[in-house]
Amino acid sequence: MNTIPFSQDRPLDLIAIGRLCIDMNANEINRPMEETLTFTKYLGGSPANIAVAAARLGLRTGFIGKVANDQFGNYITSYLVKEGIDTGNIVVDRTGAVTGLAFTEIKSSEDCSILMYRDNVADLKLEPKDVKEEYIRQSKAILISGTALSKSPSREAVFMALEYAIKHNVLVFFDVDYRPYSWNSPEETGIYCRMVAEKSDVIIAGREEFDLMEAPFGELRHDDWYTAETWLRCKAKLVMVKHGSNGSISFTNDGKTFRSGTYPTIVVKTFGAGDSFAGAFIYGLFQGWSVDRCQKFGSASASIVVASHSCSDAMPTVEQIQAVIDRNEN
Ligand SMILES: Nc1ncnc2c1ncn2[C@@H]1O[C@H](COP(=O)(O)OP(=O)(O)O)[C@@H](O)[C@H]1O
Ligand SMILES: O=C(O)C[C@@H](O)[C@H](O)C(=O)COP(=O)(O)O
């Protein structure tokens, strides 16, 4: 029996919901932003990156989101189409909102940061009426990205998607994807993310992100076992705690624990690890693999993306990920 039971006979495997943006990644790496002259444009936004990862691996993937009515918006939609992602539920904003931009600074392989331009962004203008019950009903799973909860009306749109998913037995993946600049306060983040986590089947987050959700409700433990107990007591079947270059640990509702380290790689930049990890991990769950194997697959995928210049464009194929695993096992 699969660890994660998906509804069968649905035309789509995964629908991601939330941010569709642009990454501008510094071409002159190992330099501060002040000295960076040129950037390369890529599709960005955590759920967009995860959707590309999933589609490249062969999952039938769709997206619910809102893009600006401009050239960047057109670029985003056409990139997704090229990747075979269903864009029929991506709405074009008509209020003059803009595309979110992430300028990345790659100072060294350990020291990277992002300057975000996210005032009046189209992705956070997604409205409940943009979320179609019939579309969600057609999928085996949805992926909610926490940043979409940071502002209304996107927040309500996500809750609508969550309720439709529960109603139609669509599995809910929740990636907390904490981006402080999107929120008014850590308490606000904690409370809204907690409301989604309580109803999610699979929760994927870093240690600090779980701390945020646990913080407003008692003593902060920074403890993966406490985290697992907290969320497995709710609806979660699987809790994944990511620990950056120290790997990850996951817990399932049948009392099992799985650990994964990382694969050796030449790191160009740190970002993109979480999105590639999530995309490949989710793919593995769809194949009915053991959690252990999914976690290794996710980790191998991340090792490829951190060694690349981009996030979305660098998402690997099954064969590329398997080659990393094989190389390290022989
Ligand atoms: N420097 C690295 N080298 C190899 N793999 C890495 C590295 N950093 C992260 N990973 C892999 O990516 C996974 C997710 O990374 P993490 O940094 O925790 O996510 P996020 O990017 O969301 O913060 C880790 O559990 C690990 O498997
Ligand atoms: O999510 C964004 O808006 C920016 C991403 O496209 C970016 O490249 C990134 O930070 C990836 O996130 P991660 O995988 O959690 O490191």
Image (spheres, rainbow, N blue to C red):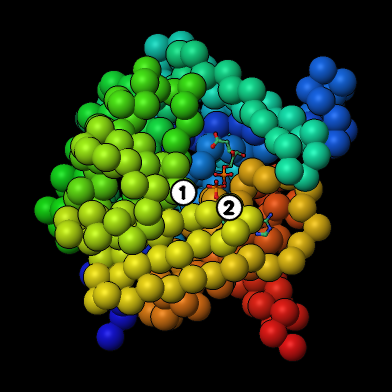
186 up-or-down from 232: above or below: above
Identity, as a three-letter code, of the amino acid under mark 2: Gly
State the residue position of label 1: 206
On screen, residue 144 versus residue 53, left or right, reads left
32 up-or-down from 200: above or below: above
On whether ligand 1 comes within 8 Å of the CB at mark 1, the answer is yes
Q: Residue at x 46, y 48 (%)?
A: 206
Q: Residue furthest bottom?
A: 330
Number of labels in the image equals 2
Q: Residue furthest left?
A: 167
Q: Quadrant of ligand 2?
A: top right
The location of residue 7, given as percent across then percent down, is 23, 70
On-image quarter of the N terminus: bottom left
What secondary structure is found at the residue carrying circle 2?
helix
Q: Residues within 10 Å of mark 2 (few under 14, many from 20)?
A: some
Q: Residue furthest top?
A: 96
The location of residue 220, given as percent across then percent down, is 32, 41
**Which is more toward the observer, 255 or 142?**
255
On whether ligand 1 comes within 8 Å of the CB at mark 2, the answer is yes
On screen, residue 159 versus residue 290, left or right, reads left
Mark drawn on residue 218 = none
- Which image quadrant for residue 150? top left
Q: Mark 1 near mark 2, Cβ–Cβ under 8 Å?
A: yes
On-image quarter of the C terminus: bottom right
Kindly tell me whether residue 304 is visible in this rendering: yes
On screen, residue 103 versus residue 139, left or right, reads right
Mark drawn on residue 244 = 2
Kindly report the distance in space between the C-alpha atoms of the residues bearing marks 1 and 2: 8 Å
The location of residue 290, given as percent across then percent down, is 42, 80
